[in-house]
Each structure stands twice: as structure tokens, then as C-alpha cells.
Image (cartoon, rainbow, N blue to C red):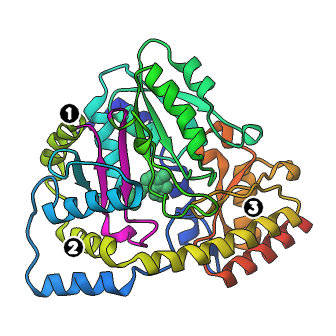
Amino acid sequence: MKIEISKTVEQMAPSGIRAFFDLVLNMKDVISLGVGEPDFVTPWNIREKVICSLEQGYTSYTSNKGMPELRKQITSFLKQRYDMDYDFDNEVLITVGVSEGLDLAMRAILNPKDKVLVPEPVYVSYGPVVELAGGTVVTLKTDIKSGFKITPKQIDQACTKGVKTLMINYPCNPTGVSYTKKELEAIAKVVKKNDLLVISDEVYDELTYDFDHTPLASIKGMKEHVVYLNGFSKAYAMTGFRLGWVCGPKKVVEAMTKIHQYTILCAPIDGQMAAIEALRNSFKSVQMMKKEYKRRRRFMVDALNELGLSCHMPDGAFYVFPSIKSTGQSSMDFAQNLLKEQQVALVPGVAFGKSAEGFVRISYASSYENLKEAIARIKKYLKK
Ligand SMILES: Cc1ncc(COP(=O)(O)O)c(C=O)c1O
């Protein structure tokens, strides 16, 4: 039988991260600093809560939108943490990770050929979810000179016919860069001027190290312009629970819920139970993990700069993003050779878009000992 695959899917490149890490699976003694996953296990109180809920027989579907108890927990958490006001019944949807939120948002708002502004370097799923929804990516390139930040002017100039959406992610995967409140206020002005809807992925918000995180939707006049995505994977070390949330204008959340109810039905109930406990009782665990990430961040930035791989201090997340331009190698060659010769796995910058060439992403969500050993191996590699 001749099987035909959708042209859009056929033309889509596989994730640069996964492709690279399939190589790692078959190798021994590899220090893997590639995948963006906390090395901590989910805090015990969260796991215990899930075990109890299973014992009590919580194994069913929930409301499509997610358990009301969890949605209420999220709205009161956002009120307390950031003074944001959302109606749990109309403006919140529980998703299978931020990943689902990104996909739903695109499918809910885009019509064929609509254009979406996407900053680069960019998290690997952004381009594909835009294309799968029939949209077209308009890249906003950033570089080390601009601190890997998009500027209001850049957004304004890119707002040509057909542009109605901006995707933003801060702290950013892969650069670790974030935005201050002042910078966000300037971005907000140009968003309002051009009547854009912003999909704001703030999944690393709790892992912001040197200043307070400001949600874009919390800025005056921005609530109606923002679909705010967040989740439990990173700060709570809950990647496997697959739990995220969306807060946004009622009309958009309703449209996203429509797709979600036909394709996913509801997020898994054990993940929702875990999320309730995470928001109620995990502040100390999150702070403990954050403190350790911060210690590792310092170590990695200093060590890489000492090795001559120029590295900016990331504001958040758990990635460093050093330049490897001084080696004269492409990011793919650097990553492949380092893996072959010294068994250290990191992600070539090019996986995050053309403007990330010349850089590599190293995750420091790995033990301090692993990081020290990785640096020693990178040193050996560079000496050769
Ligand atoms: C920027 C960004 N958004 C979304 C995701 C996906 O998160 P989730 O596990 O909640 O689907 C990741 C995971 O690495 C990420 O880095």
C-alpha cells in the first residue's frame, strides 16, 4: 500500500535534541547535559499525595477543563504570587504540559497563512506547532550583542500584514535570558499598539535567579493580550506527570478547550492531584532546588569562561549557552566530536535555529560532580 503522509509533517525536521540524544542512548560512560529535565526526583509530599489518591480510587476522567479544585488552586496561587486575577471557571484550562498549551493556542487562533512572530534562538517545538496549525513563522533574530533579547522596535517593525501573534518564552530555553519588568512594559506598549495576542511561555518562572519574575499578563492592560502558559515540569521536577495550565481571555480558553476536549479529553487525574499538592505545599522544595541550580550556574559560567568558551550569565532556567566560535567548529561538529572523544553530550545551538549557530546549550540540571567531570572532559577536548 502506498501510504501518504501529510506534506506539512513530511517536510518538518525531527527535533534536533532528540535526534542527537538517540546517538547517546547507545554509548557508555556518557555525561548527558542535553535534555532539559531536572535531575531531582519529584518532592516526596507530591508523590505521596498521588499514591494516596490512587489508593482512594482516583483513577477516572475529570472535567475537560481540569478539576475545579486545581483550577481554583491555580487562580488563588496567581493572585497571591503575582496579584493576577483569573476566573477559574472561564479563563483557566489544565493541559498535558505546556507542550499541549502551545499546540492548542496555535490551533485555536490561527487561520491559514496567519503569521506568528517567533524570537530565535527558540525552543524546538515553537516552529512546528505554528506550521502544524497552518501558520507561518516570522523569525525575530537575536544575538549575543542584543543579549539574546527581542526589542520593542524589532517587534514593531515585524508587524506587517497578517501578523497577529507573538510567541515569547522567558526565562528562555536555550539562552536562559529573561526580561525585567521595565523591559516587559516596553514590549507591552508595542503589543498593544499592534493589537497582538501574545503566547507567553513562562514555564521557568520560578527558576529566575537575580530578579523577580514578572508575568507579561500582570502588566497593566495586558491581560486581554496574553495567553499565559505555565506548568509543573521544571520548578517542581514533575516532567513525567505531564501537567500544565493556560490562563487567558475567555474566548481563547474556550476555543482551546474545544480542541482539548476532542483530542485529549482531560489531563491525567494523578497529575492533577500532584499539581494540587505542588501548589499547596512545595514552596520549600522549590527553593531548595533553585538554590542548587544557582550554585551550579555560577560554577558552569565561570568554568566555561576560564576555558575560553565565552559564556553570559543566564537569568534563569537551567541552561548555559556558551559560544564555541573560538574553536572554529560548527556547533554540530563540536557536539558530535565532544561526544565521540570525551563522552559529554550537549545540544548544538543549531537545534534552536540558525541564529544559535556558534553556540551550544549545556543543561546544569545534573549533579555538581557530573558538571565538574564534564568541564574536565571539555578541557581535554579543547586541548587536543
Ligand atoms: C520553553 C519550554 N516550553 C515548554 C516546554 C515543555 O514543557 P512541558 O513538560 O510542560 O510540556 C519546555 C520543555 O523543555 C520548554 O523548555
User: Which of 359/245 is in front?
Assistant: 245
Left or right: residue 312 compared with residue 152: right
Left or right: residue 346 compared with residue 288: right
Camera-nearest label, 2 or 3: 2
* Residue designated by label 1: 251
> Considering the numbered disc 2 on the image, is that residue within a helix, a strand or a loop?
helix
* Residue shown at the point (37%, 32%) measured from the top left: 225
* Residue designated by label 2: 273
Q: Amino acid at mark 3?
A: Asn
For disc 1, the neighbor class at 10 Å (few under 14, some 14 to 19, many from 20) is some
* Residue shown at the point (68%, 74%) measured from the top left: 296
Q: Are marks 3 and 1 in contact (CB under 8 Å)?
A: no
Labels 2 and 1: the sequence-earlier one:
1
The x, y position of residue 328, in whole percent, is 86, 48
For disc 3, the neighbor class at 10 Å (few under 14, some 14 to 19, many from 20) is some
* Residue shown at the point (53%, 49%) measured from the top left: 170
Let me know if residue 312 appears in the view.
Answer: yes
Q: Are marks 2 and 1 in contact (CB under 8 Å)?
A: no
Region rendered in magenta: 224-249
Residue 375, picture quadrant: bottom right
